[in-house]
Amino acid sequence: MVEFSKRNARTWARMGIRATYGQALSGYAAENPNVLALSADLGRSSGLDRFSKEFPKQFINTGIAEQNMVGVAAGLARSGFDVFASTFAPFASMRASEQVRMNMGYMQEPVKLVALGSGFAMGFLGNSHYGLEDLAVMRAIPGLTIISPADCSEIYKTLEACIGYPKPVYIRLTGAVNCPIVYEDDYEFTIGKAIWIKPAADITLVSSGTTVGHCLEAANRLAEEGVTVGVLNMHTIKPLDTDALDLAASTASTLIVVEEHMRTGGLGSAVLAHFADAGNPGCRIVTHGIADRYGETGNYAYLLKIAGLDADGVVDLVKRETANV
């Protein structure tokens, strides 16, 4: 049984996203021999080094062959196993996109494909390893559920919810070590249902992944200046919680979507598409993500800062956008 506490939240944050993923999956594998982990030769990098040693019969290294990994995962999933297959985000979403489309989308094999290092998390490895277009690719595949946990605690929640879940899932892991803490206590997590971190307000931030933590810090800082900001954790990007979005739009004058992804095809695009179908939301909608260009290479925190995706950037964004109303 996982204990959600301030101490564990701090420990997991120091470990980082990938190490927490490996530890969490190890814990669930110990309880359930039906849980399998597949890796495209990223045992240590994926946090699965311990898993491979403790549960060798539940671990398969397919080598640097992401397309084959998805095919193997689909066959095992059809055989009744709970399969979590992991590799870096661009290779999961683009190199293996045909296999994801056919085996996970068309054939609906319930593989859980874990995209490591999404966003800028791979830092100095540069644009070849950044996962900034993956949502645009994965959102276009019918029948695919997409989840991006807000912090390390939510990784545990996500994996738990995915065990036995009868549909294919793309799990997008952003962030690195010392990622922002959003949840210190236990809470209810349901696939497809967003979570209000701060209640809907005249200004509401909608986000997913570890940018939720930066939005929360920004909202806390703005509150000290007398500015009330709502924060909505849209951890499930597909299917989108449109009820939560409608509530946000009915309360806000400005709805700001913040994401560590290209502005094209990500969460912001999903939100805009919803309101294009639903009609006039009654508020301004601002999307804030990565500009349409290849970015710099460098330290993760530096990359977030120059993209305006850290807490400082979000504070500036809110002030700038609300001044334009």
Image (cartoon, grey):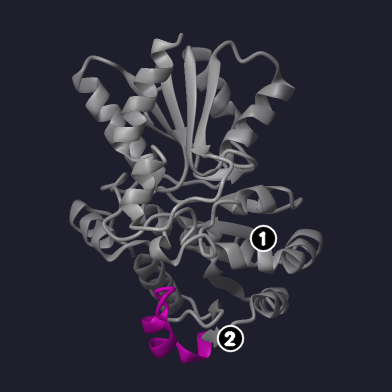
Q: Position of residue 189 (x, y in %)?
A: 45, 46
Relative to 263, is 13 above or below?
below
Quadrant housing residue 122? bottom left
Q: Position of residue 68 (x, y in %)?
A: 70, 80
Alpha-carbon span between mark 1 and mark 2: 22 Å
Q: Is residue 259 visible in the rendered structure shown here? A: yes
Disc 2 target residue: 63
Residue 305 is one of the magenta-drawn residues:
no
Is 166 positioned to the left or the right of 55 in the image?
right
Q: Secondary structure at mark 1?
A: loop
Relative to 264, is 54 above or below?
below
Q: Residue at x 58, y 86 (%)?
A: 63
**Quadrant in which the N terminus appears:** bottom left
Along the line of sight, which residue is nearer the eye, 239 or 314?
A: 314
Disc 1 target residue: 168
Q: Position of residue 190 (x, y in %)?
A: 51, 46
Q: Which residues are magenta?
A: 44-58
**Total marks drawn?**
2
Along the line of sight, which residue is nearer the eye, 127 or 68?
A: 127
Amino acid type at image mark 1:
Pro
